[in-house]
Amino acid sequence: MLDVLGVDEVWEVPDGWVEGVRGRLREWGDDAGALRPGVFAEFVEGTPAAVWFVHEVAPLLAGWVPVLRGEYADLGAVLTREFHRPGARVGGDGYVVRVAQADWPLQMVSGARGFPEDARMQALRASRDVVELFVEAPPLAARAQALTAAFERVLADRDATRMHVAADYDTIAEYWRSGLLTDAERAVLPELGGPAAALRYSLDSLRDVHGKLTAVVADDESREFAQLLARMIRAVGLRGQPAAVGQILGVAGWDVEYAIADLEKGFDPHGWLARNTAWLARAVGEGHEGLARSWAAAATRVSVQLTGVPERGAWPDPEVPDLGAFFQRPVATEEPVKVTWTAKPEPEVEIEPEVEVRPEVEPAPEELVVREVPVTEETGALAELDALVGLESVKDSVRRMVAEIKTNLRRQEFGLPAQERARHMVFVGKPGTAKTTIARLLARIYKELGVLESGHVVEVDRSDLVGPTVGTTAPMTAAKFREALGGVLFVDEAYTLVPEGQPGDFGLEAVATILKMMEDHRDKCVVIVAGYHREMQRFMESNTGLQSRFPKLLSFSEYDTDQLVAIFELQARQQGMVYTHEVLVRVRKVIPPAPRGHNFGNGRFIRNLLEEAISNQATRLARRDPDTLTERDLRELLPEDVKPAASMRAEDYLLQKPGT
């Protein structure tokens, strides 16, 4: 049987199902064309990559950081036993905790990324075929079905398939994090949104089940979630709340800080773990076994993630609670079981009661390199924000706005008055400093938080708002505003609406119309006005209603040369291009020296430079026989390809005027 902690029913695994999977694995083993990148650790020589992948993903289809018990607790090893030669096997009454990187379904795709395209296609199809083996296994079915559907969509979409066989891995991983999965699939595969999404899911699920369980079985020591989390943080050996946890909790994180401070007076982690286990046993005895098991599963996820939460330096030794009491038949042992904690993807942790865990790093097999994704602090639009080059003050301002919104949403849940402020903003900075990019990300963030209904952006300038004759401006402006309802109205070069020295200009009517509709449609649209520093100051002073309705100002600094080179690298990788150090040296030479022209394009300049380089590369390769071109030839940029674009303006190379 297979007992998954948190799942209501134990699965009596049919012999026929096991033999059916093993039969499929034998077929792959007999297939001469199967992808065989080399020797996998603890597998017989010549094992197909798909067989190895079965071993890796089987337990993880049971859940994110699953706890499994029974004869099939080490399900992957049971299914692959004809190929797998481990030093020890797990079974019987033991239980296993599995931990993985957030992109675990892409291990074959990642491992094959240096292979020819046909091999990368094999890896993609095999990933789908492996996951599909588990769609009829009850504790694994929901996640297996969601993953199978995702892989099917990739294979059915020509562009998505091409990305998986030709693009760099970062592009593929980001596509899975933010562009591929449906909302229903994200609900059962939360970790695929990235490490921060996985941590958020773990904290939210523990907070939810803790509230439900304490409502029926009082826990005097940890009545509030903050008290519980503070004790868990101290129990795993951390002295304070990790930054990633604090960012997810927002203002509620201060409650955790206060609870941690209270524990400084004296906290015995072993005593707390024992009392906590007794509390759960009481819950089981009172007929709340399902809630107790769900609580234990959620607490295990949080404990494991706290141990390896996004912090630099060595991980502390985690304290793992006695999980045996949370199963239908408690696990008993007299001798502690030695535990291995490994940093490679899908490390396996065998745990028994009162186990001491020691970190031990084991390298991944060289034959199939599995990418370890750096742990980030956010996911989705916020992850994209963090990935942008520079803009630190802007990023900090956005994080603060997000924290305010989350806190207000939490206040509303408790029936408290929200401290709402207008969300309209002024963006000031030169062209190409990512003002439009930030506006688009903010729209997505507000949608994710439930602040905006659709999260779309309507980008306009003077020509979209101001009519040529009397009576045409107000209807044009109102139409664009209505188009932006549910999203963001981004007015670029907003200062052109109030030309200097022209008091009767129609643009003033556009400004007045925007202000009136902002009042009429409160909370239904966020308006962002953008432009140069000095000109926007004049714009804000042109109408007394502007300053009160735009309380936030974000200043976008000009990129320095190092940041511009970094932007070139980022955009080149996103385009699937490769380059040498000499190319970057050439890019640095092409970038005009500071101080740069008032209208210098910054990121826009770099985008044009890269597009021109790719065009120059195509011209260079066109002089060769197409049959002799390799994949590297098609992806590689050379220093000679990097030249100022013919479309670049002379203003990019003119010195800026003082004070601009």
Image (tube, rainbow, N blue to C red):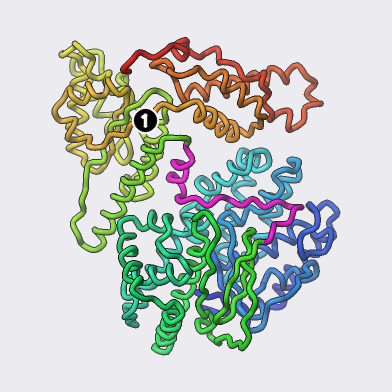
Residue at the image position 46 percent from the left and 70 percent from the top: 298
Q: Position of residue 3 (x, y in %)?
A: 58, 78
548 w.r.t. 55: above or below: above
Who's the residue at 51% across and 45% down the image?
179
Q: Quadrant of the N terminus?
A: bottom right
Residue 310 percent coordinates (x, y): 49, 55
How many C-alpha atoms fall within 10 Å of the one at disc 1: few (<14), some, or many (≥20)? many
**Is residue 12 at all visible to an observer of this figure?**
no
Magenta stretch, main secondary structure, is loop
Which structural element holds mark 1?
strand
Compared with 325, 440 (above or below) is above
Residue at x-position 21% and y-position 48%: 420
Q: Specify the amino acid type for callout 1.
A: Phe
- Count all numbered tags in the image, as a single digit: 1
Q: Residue under circle 1?
A: 556
* Quadrant of the image occupied by residue 290: bottom left
Q: What stretch is highlighted in magenta?
A: 362-388
- 84 horizontally vs 609: left or right: right
Q: Where is residue 240 in the image (x, y as percent from the top left)?
A: 40, 62
Q: Residue at left 67%, top 29%?
A: 580
| 369 magenta-colored | yes
Judge whether 198 appears above or below 224 on screen.
Answer: above
Q: In the shown orientation, is residue 642 left or right of residue 378?
A: right
Return the residue found at the far left: 544
Screen quadrant of the C terminus: top left
Look at the picture and state if 272 lies above or below 574.
below
Q: Which of 515 and 330 is in front in this view?
A: 330
Left of 57 or right of it: where is 552?
left
Q: Nearer the viewer, residue 628 or 198?
A: 198
